[in-house]
Amino acid sequence: MTLETPFHPRTAELNQARRWRKWSGFFIADSYFPAHDLEYHAIRFSAALFDITPMCKYRVSGPDAAKLVNRVITRRVDRIKPMRAIYTPWCDHDGRVLDDGTVALLADGSYFWTAAEPQHGWLEAASEGLNVTIEDVTERICALSLQGPCSRDVLSSAVGRDLSDLPFFGRADVTIGGVPVGVSRTGYSGDLGFELFMPFESALPVWDALIKAGENYTLRVAGMEALDVARLEAGLIMAGVDYHSGRTARHPSLAVSPYEIGMDRLVDLDKPAFIGKRALMDEVAAGGPANRLVGLELDLNVFEDAYLDLGYPIEHPLRAWRHVTPLMRKGETIGRATSGTFSPLLKRSIALGFLPTKHAEVGSTVSIEWQIEETRQQIPATVVPLPFLDLPRKRS
């Protein structure tokens, strides 16, 4: 049975479009209005509030908590300072990525772990021989994401003090609406932003306090469609869309290593050991991955001419698309695009995809297959640097 998040009494009232999606067993708003443009522009020009409760959440504690974290993630656990978080992937024994997320070291010495997909079983299996406790708190701790250039102002107003001293990937314990809230200076929008964690039973006072604080900053509630456009602009990958977990991939070719999805800097092969290290060392020794994640920019002139030549009005996708689309070169399929969108801010049609390493250099050109009604068109696309949009304020 699909669950309602603790914020549902508020989000249901606001969801004029009545459009919902299922995410990890919960209902989450796709868009609050028939089109998500106002919500997207709130992310980029004011502030947007998202319900991200379905994100999987774990608390790892006990004498060997650090040993477990170090055993699983590809980064060094000593890089996680108290009340700070890091972003990291973790792999299976074949070096295939299982998921990616954040791991934070809290004030009490426990670790707070977020993931896109369930990981409890994997963490339990990896903890063999260790004195550690792993709690799945996904259905006990709810979460909000507050993103956009005014997000710090909104949050500071709700908390009652200036939070400018909270650094990128920093953590803080605050009180909002009389409720203790854990705040992380993180997000999935490529913009200035925060993620907030609180008990299920305390959700609504926090929501109401944030909405009240946001009245002076044009705060809007926003759904997953707007966030999908923003994360693509920021070149942020999505598990289950841009890559598939090594545990659930339908075909071995869909399971990827960290090197294939641009996470080279997040793999520390100098660590004495971590799950998947031997396979990743072998991959590096063999010359690296056969395929690489790339950013693609479609040729808008050819794209628009394709519609006009067929007698159709030009139709840029209103929503981000998430389906495998062939990438071709000289009539041969050599790769795949996984998701894309028209960027309202950049005025460019962009996509993420995978190409053979020899074709993945910036400036390389391919064709992306694009269907217009009953016809299939070939639209030129150029490999461009990631991220498409890099806002300095996201790190401020």
Image (cartoon, rainbow, N blue to C red):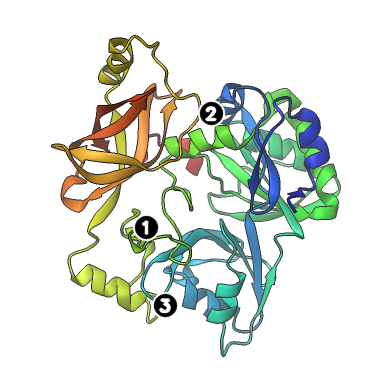
- Give the CA separation, mark 1 to mark 2: 32 Å
Q: Secondary structure at mark 2?
A: helix
Q: Quadrant of residue 43?
A: top right
Q: Quadrant of residue 322?
A: top left
Q: Given the current orientation, which residue lies at the most extreme front position? A: 374
- Give the CA separation, mark 2 to mark 3: 38 Å
Q: Secondary structure at mark 3?
A: loop
Image depth: mark 1 or mark 2 in front: 1
Residue 274, which numbered label? 3
User: Closer to the camera, 243 or 396?
Assistant: 243
Residue at figure coordinates x 74%, y 59% from the top left: 139
Q: Secondary structure at mark 1?
A: helix
Dot 2 corresponds to which residue?
44
Q: Left or right of 103: which side holds 295?
A: left
Image depth: mark 2 or mark 3 in front: 3
Q: Earlier in the sequence, mark 1 or mark 2?
A: 2
Residue type marked 1? Leu
Residue type marked 2? Arg
Indicate the quadrant containing the N terminus: top left, top right, bottom left or bottom right: bottom right
Relative image position of residue 155 (x, y in whole percent): 70, 39
In the depicted structure, whether residue 154 falls above or below residue 293:
above
Relative image position of residue 305 (x, y in whole percent): 28, 14
Dot 1 corresponds to which residue?
254
Residue at figure coordinates x 43%, y 60% from the top left: 250
Image depth: mark 3 or mark 1 in front: 1
Relative image position of residue 290 (x, y in whole percent): 22, 58
Q: Is any part of residue 385 visible from this angle?
A: no
